[in-house]
Amino acid sequence: MSDKVLRGMISAALALPLKQRLRLMGWAVRQIVAPLAGYRKRSMDNLAHVWPDMPEADRRRIADAVSDNAGRTMIENYDVPGLLARMASASVTGDGLPAMEQARAEGRPILFVTGHYGNFEAPRAALVARGWRIGGLYRPMANPFFNEHYAANMHALSDPVFEQGRRGTMGLLRHIREGGMGVLLFDVYSSDGVPIDFLGQPAPTLTSAADIALKTGALFVPFFGIRQSDGQSFKAVFEAPIPHGDPVEMMREATARLEARIKEDPAQWFWIHRRWKPRRQAKRQRKRAAANMGP
């Protein structure tokens, strides 16, 4: 039932002109979904965790803007032809472009990394619209009915796309090793991750993106799809590649690049994520400490 309701909402929104569609979905998630689902509170709690001195009014303003961006992003990514058409003429900049072009000419693989900032699919769409073929890895939705059309939408932008997990990671690794290009988002909590400070607080972070780059020799390029002030256009920025080295240090640098963007405009990052889970981290630390003490 929830999938049918969501499909109906998406279909109705896609029937509207772009400006009205984005405004509607932003409003719906900000005013209806976020308060009911607890997204606003979670965003505000996360903001308080990293910036405890921030006034509550500022936290609420950012949390509402985050929900608005989430609604716009969702409906943008359901209109793949429209997103490709818009990004074909979008601004594509950054210090990483010369190295990317050289790698493409030489057949060297490229692994693009980013976080849930702005619209993370916009830069991929910009390159696909210019003739690039870029695969990706996605996290499946809990609702299998919703996941069916969500996954189909991911494939529609550019194949190959792999479902997150051991099998999917191996598939992406094989694609990159064969000289392909792919995208990975690294800013999600993982109990298997290495604690890396993110906005001043430790956040378990997987090194799998750096590991893949090292195993395949892929260029390791951070990128960002930055939503502009009109609420509907983007600037795709491809930053200077991160040099190969220790995988933890590579991910620390990728994290620092994302931090810089968030500090520039906090409302564009997805504060709805349970990125830090401080209670769970503390519990795991207590268990490790007890195990190390022994009998």
Image (cartoon, rainbow, N blue to C red):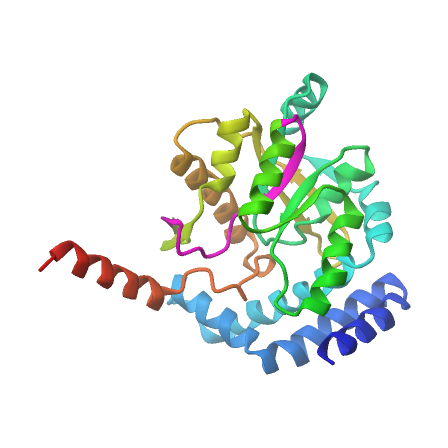
Locate the N terminus by quadrant. Answer: bottom right
Q: Measured from the top left, where is residue 77 in percent x and y?
A: 76, 56
Residue drawn at (67%, 81%), measured in percent from left and top? 32
Residue drawn at (64%, 22%), measured in percent from left and top? 108
Who is closer to the viewer here, 193 or 65?
A: 193
The reply to whether the magenta stretch includes residue 195 is yes
Locate the C terminus by quadrant. Answer: bottom left
Query: In which quadrant of the rendered view does residue 265 lie?
Result: bottom right
Instruction: Tell me the magenta residue range.
Output: 178-196
The reply to whether the magenta stretch includes residue 245 is no
Residue drawn at (12%, 57%), measured in percent from left and top? 294
**One can see residue 242 in this view:** no
Query: In which quadrant of the rendered view does residue 51 lie?
Result: bottom left
Q: Check the image and report above or below for 181 versus 83.
A: above
Residue drawn at (16%, 54%), measured in percent from left and top? 292
Q: Measured from the top left, where is residue 102 in percent x and y?
A: 67, 19
**One can see residue 208 in this view:** yes
Who is closer to the viewer here, 234 or 73?
A: 73
Query: In which quadrant of the rendered view does residue 219 lie?
Result: top right
Q: Is residue 274 left or right of residue 99?
A: left
